[in-house]
Image (cartoon, grey):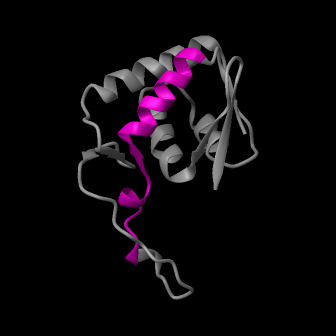
Amino acid sequence: MAFILVPGRGVELIVNAWNWRPTLSLIRSAGLITEEDYERWGAQGCGGEVDTDLARRIAAVLERRLATMKQGERMLSDLTITAAPKTDVKFTPHTKSEEIDTNDLYSASYEWLVTFHDFCNESQGFKVS
């Protein structure tokens, strides 16, 4: 599943759910969005709008997080940082949910966070679709 971020200015940005969900958790934990925004932005096709001011505040949160990370690291769903490689998971009809570490599965890479930070600074706001 992918989300498309459509900027007020510039080129749209596409992000997969694996990177997007922990990014939303970071934004929510900073108090920049409501629980309703978190749910809407995390569901494909439900929309969401970010004005220029909010985009810049999101960029500031990302900048602070990136200052605690190094290239090649990733931020897990619980917002902790790891350098460990992502665990390979093979989904089959017999895969049980308790066998899957969703905290590891959903993780935002350092590289993605840099890209999103730059996008937020340059976009003049954006829509989530």
Residue at the bottom extreme, as displayed: 94
Asked if residue 49 shows in the view, the reply is no
Q: Name the residue rendered at 36%, 38% in the picture.
A: 110
Q: Quadrant of residue 71?
A: top left
Residue in front for this viewpoint, 89 or 12: 12
Query: Is residue 52 placed above or below 110 in the rendered structure?
Result: above
Which image quarter is the C terminus in? top right
Name the main secondary structure of what is drawn in magenta: helix
Q: Is residue 81 shown above or below 51?
A: below
Percent x, y of residue 69: 26, 34
Asked if the magenta segment contains residue 109, the reply would be yes
Task: Say whether residue 31 is left or right of residue 49.
Answer: left
Estimate the x, y position of residue 12 in percent, counting from the top left. 68, 31
Q: Looking at the picture, how far across and down is residue 37, in whole percent?
A: 63, 35
Number of numbered discs overlaid on the protein picture: 0
In the image, farthest residue toward the top: 53
Residue 62 location, quadrant: top left
Residue 108 part of the magenta segment: yes
Q: Residue at x 57, y 31 (%)?
A: 34
Q: Which residues are magenta?
A: 99-122
Residue 105: percent from left, percent from top: 41, 60
Which part of the image, by quadrant, shows the N terminus? bottom right
**Image point (62%, 18%), residue name:** 123
